[in-house]
Image (tube, helix red, strand yellow):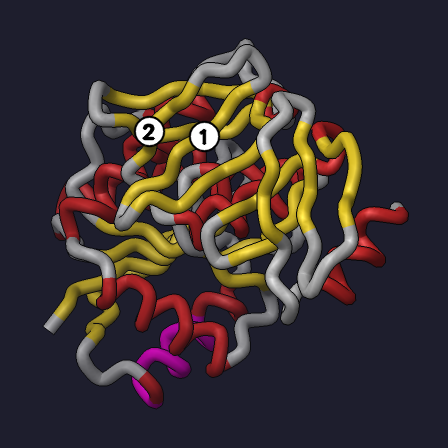
Amino acid sequence: MMNAIIIDDETYGSATLEKMLQQHAPGIQVIAKAASAAEGRQAILKHQPDLVFLDIEMPGGSGFDLLAGFETPSFQVIFVTGYDRYALQAIKCCAVDYLLKPVEPAELNRALDKLNRNTQNATLERLQHLVDFMAKPSNKSNKICVPTPNGMELIPASDICYCEASREYTLLHTTNNGVITSSYNIGEFESMLENFGFFRIHNSYIINHDKVLRYLKGEGGTVIMSNKTELPVSRRRKPEFLEWLKN
């Protein structure tokens, strides 16, 4: 059994989510609810939950403000929020899951399944990356948070030429011909970079539109990047890729 807290200033939304969890996730027990960041902090300290469903925009302090008060979060988080481009972008950058309001049962199940597939240590590490990312006032929305073997790096998306899958790791090839090794898999980078003009041309490669020099025809074809690297385009992705390339 996993103990959970719901922190949301919308009473109806909070009650609806609790009922949905009772119906679709019997392994999760809601042990407390709170309507503000301040109340939420007290509830977390009192109950020591395994999981927190956290709204982002609340009066008197955001969900990010709440997280910033915990130097090392000991609980996992699923954000529950209305659409906010910057907030969702930041969450994606650190690969922490979220639900859009109004919450749909299928999306709830997806988020819980993702939570179960990741180890607790991995999800808590990613949550810490997000806390650090949001805490730095110099952060701009064009940066992504990349965990590396030595810690993490904040990298402007525009500095990435392409991403390359390397077993369970991803290699980020940068415009200065540097290579950054990340513990995130390439699927996570596909989600993180989709709003920055990137496209997955192959199971092993994601490319930056601004760094494409030319495309050479073929069964799938080949792209030549700004650093002169030639990368294959899969036949299956070719039609969508050609449309993306025109934009």
Overall secondary structure of the magenta section: helix
Residue 117, quarter of picture = bottom left
Q: Is residue 67 left or right of residue 133?
A: left
Give the residue type that dot 2 points to.
Thr
Pick whichever of labels 1 and 2 is earlier in the sequence: 1
Residue wearing tag 2: 181
Which residue matches tag 1? 172
- Percent across and percent down for residue 35 are 43, 51
Q: Is residue 92 left or right of residue 118?
A: right
Which segment is the magenta one?
A: 15-23
Residue drawn at the location 49% of the way across and 26% of the way down? 173
Quadrant including the N terminus:
bottom left
When the figure is inspected, residue 213 is found, relative to residue 52, above or below; the finding is: above
Q: Position of residue 63 (x, y in %)?
A: 44, 40
Q: Secondary structure at mark 2?
A: strand
In the rendered image, the vertical position of residue 87 relative to residue 147, given as above or below? below
Res 114 visible = yes
